[in-house]
Image (cartoon, grey):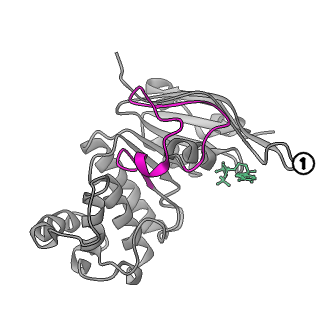
Amino acid sequence: MSQAILTLKNIDVTVNLNTSEEKRILKNLNLTVNKGDFITLLGTNGAGKSTLFNTINGSIFPTKGQVLLANQDITNQPEVSRASQIAQVFQDPKMGTAPRMTVSENLLLAQKRGQKRGLKLRGLRQQKDYFLKIASQLPNGLDQRLDTPTGSLSGGQRQTLSFLMATLNQPQLLLLDEHTAALDPNTSRQLMELTNQVVQEKQLTCIMITHQLADALKYGNRTIVLKDGQIVLDQAGQAKKDLTEEEILTYFAD
Ligand SMILES: Nc1ncnc2c1ncn2[C@@H]1O[C@H](COP(=O)(O)OP(=O)(O)OP(=O)(O)O)[C@@H](O)[C@H]1O
């Protein structure tokens, strides 16, 4: 039987409760993500995709319902205590890294995520060779920039680093929020290929938000369409392989 990594039960998210601005964003949403699932998540602007990620990573709490991670109820657990298990890469390359710290220091920070640590980062020298080895397997010449402050990297290098940091420690769940959208077409393609390779090799469980229909169909084993706060399409395996862009587009129509 497949092992559930993430279970969302009857999730409602309503913002600005009891005001004229009250808005119900997620509506009784149910979802089980199994170990090894690589889900591509599509939906119109405003469908609730980022709100769904925020509910999973704990940056907001649902108004109703339960969030389970590996069958443990984490509904009321704060974001920081989920960070060692749930990793996320955002659209904005500036979001995932500390700009004044070097590439190596950022990698060390990622490696120690979830561990208690003092203010000083220890063990950088011992890890340098390891970081050089993994960075040299990546595009963008990141291996030449290990001692460079992250703030002076290109957007593509910075986003590749954010992805590497998010996946370094084998998170239970990886959330990718349009992580290639801000990059030029070639760099975007390279990072998408790297993503696919790492997710396969490390057998990660991953949900990737994308607006690229071709990517949603090409990558992953399962495709979900969110519309107006509800899941309107959820296809896995052969049914996903048989999906077409035309069919997906019918779920976007009003
Ligand atoms: N804190 C908030 N207060 C008020 N409205 C909000 C809040 N958060 C989200 N919304 C609204 O809820 C809806 C869903 O937002 P969300 O960012 O989850 O959509 P999305 O599917 O990620 O969209 P996009 O593809 O544009 O990123 C939008 O209409 C948004 O404006």
User: Which residue is painted at 57% across and 43% down in the image?
Assistant: 55
Q: Position of residue 13 (x, y in %)?
A: 69, 39
Local secondary structure at mark 1: loop
The residue at 16%/71% (across/down) is 124
Q: Which residues are magenta?
A: 59-88
Quarter of the image containing the C terminus?
Answer: top right
Q: Is residue 225 magenta?
A: no
Marker count (numbered): 1
Camera-side residue of 42 and 244: 42
Q: Is residue 213 above or below residue 241?
A: below
- Circle 1 packing at 10 Å, graded few (<14), some (14-19), many (20+), is few
Side of 183 where 174 appears, left or right? left
Report the side of 16 relative to 172 (left or right): right
Question: Would you say 186 lies left or right of 233 here?
Answer: left
In the picture of the structure, the residue carrying the numbered disc 1 is 20
**Spot occupied by residue 252 in the image (x, y as percentages of width and height):** 72, 40
- The amino acid pointed to by label 1 is Ser
Q: Residue furthest top?
A: 1
Residue reaching furthest to the right: 20
Depicted 106 relative to depicted 35: above or below: below
User: CB of residue at label 1: within 8 Å of ligand 1?
Assistant: no
Tell me which corner region of the image, top left, top right, bottom left or bottom right, holds residue 145: bottom left
Instruction: Check if residue 61 falls in the magenta segment.
Output: yes
Q: Residue at x 40, y 69 (%)?
A: 97
| Residue sitting at x 23%, y 70% | 121
Question: Residue 28 at x, y = what percent?
Answer: 68, 28
Quadrant the N terminus occupies: top left
